[in-house]
Amino acid sequence: MPMEIINPISYRKWNDLILEGHRGAFFNSANWARVLAESYGYEPIYFSIVERGRLSAMIPVMGIRSILTGRRGVSLPFTDYCEPIFLDDGYRKLSMEFVKEYGKRRGWRYIEFRGNDYIADDMTCFNSYVGHTLDLCADEDELLSGMRSCMRKNIGKALRMGAKAEISTSLESLGEFYRLHCVTRKRHGLPPQPFHFFGKIHEHMIEKGLGMVILASYGDRYVAGGVFFQFGESAIHKYTALDMRFQEMRPVNLIIWEAIRHYAKSGYKTLCMGRTDQDATGLRWFKTAWGAKEHVIRYFRYDPKSGSYAGPSSPMSKRLCVVFNGMPLPLLKVAGKLLYRHVG
């Protein structure tokens, strides 16, 4: 069966294909493809083999054209990981060769694959991170006992100090999260994504029952927030934001616990806690303290012109983070609006 290029946005029942056999993940969905395409003008190019109504192979790619960073294919931009679908190794080899040749014809500078299943285990990766996945197949008492005692204490501390957590799907709640998100990104020395991007998340995911916002409040003030996605039997914690003046109240702990309780009661099997840098030991400890299992996420970057894979990359310059950190927030928002479509 020949490989074809599919646009999942216009392909009827694409999500059903992805979910068949519980192989698919949220980032392979048509909804996420629509968010990326409409937010930044990327071209969905999903290399697929469909046999008798079943997806035998699939590599999701967004084609990016930028006057700053050139033409390239990424699987997928602004995505922690995006595993392909292959029924067996024969499909993997066929699909990868097809994508490489396609990228060469299109003049792509490189093709970036974000996931472990694209390349053989002995291949040098371009970058690597760690992911954390929490098993939700337990009742509330078991979930509590599965986390470290400090996490239980911090949840209790947040409640005793008067913090409250609420689940919402409104655009207004996403706006409150975005306010906190902008301040958090500035603290980390990074521009925030434009609100247009989050508006597309609301339109194509949250309004479609594939996401939610959880806000932590203290009195009449929102002090922390999280954005979560759900698809099939899995949930994902994608974004976190915090007003550092209320850190000692541990509102983020309360938000995560509310998400765990909600998804467990709703029948979801796992909660993915996102991508973490290898050297972020504190954040890694925080995620494993919930009882989450740690695993490596590998990124590969292929150069169609030379026919070779790139070696390990250098981390983003700390000087650049210092520059962004020193910018006034309105200017930082402008930088995010101008730059993000070029760096996906």
Image: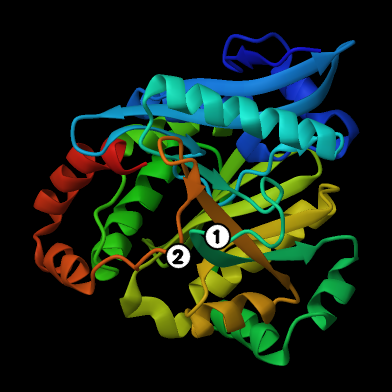
Quick one: label 1, few (<14), some, or many (20+) residues within 10 Å? many
Residues at discs 1 and 2 in contact (Cβ within 8 Å) = yes
- Residue in view at x 41 percent, y 80 percent: 247
Left or right, 314 with respect to 84, comes to left
* Mark drawn on residue 125: 1
- Residue in view at x 75 percent, y 81 percent: 147
Q: Which of the 4 image quarters holds residue 305?
A: top left
Front position in the image: 337 or 8: 8
Q: Secondary structure at mark 1?
A: loop
Marks 1 and 2 sit apart, C-alpha to C-alpha, by 6 Å
Residue 87 shows in the view? yes
Residue 203 shows in the view? no
Residue 192 position, x and y percent, is 28, 51
Left or right, 332 with respect to 37, comes to left
The amino acid sitting under disc 1 is: Cys
On-image quarter of the C terminus: top left
Front position in the image: 131 or 252: 131
- Residue in view at x 35 percent, y 49 percent: 178
From this view, report whether residue 221 is shown above or below residue 176: below
Q: Looking at the image, how many numbered discs can be counted on the residues?
A: 2
Q: Secondary structure at mark 2?
A: loop
Front position in the image: 141 or 7: 7
The amino acid sitting under disc 2 is: Pro
Q: Which of the 4 image quarters holds residue 241?
A: bottom left
- The residue indicated by pointer 2 is 312
Residue 115 position, x and y percent, is 63, 50
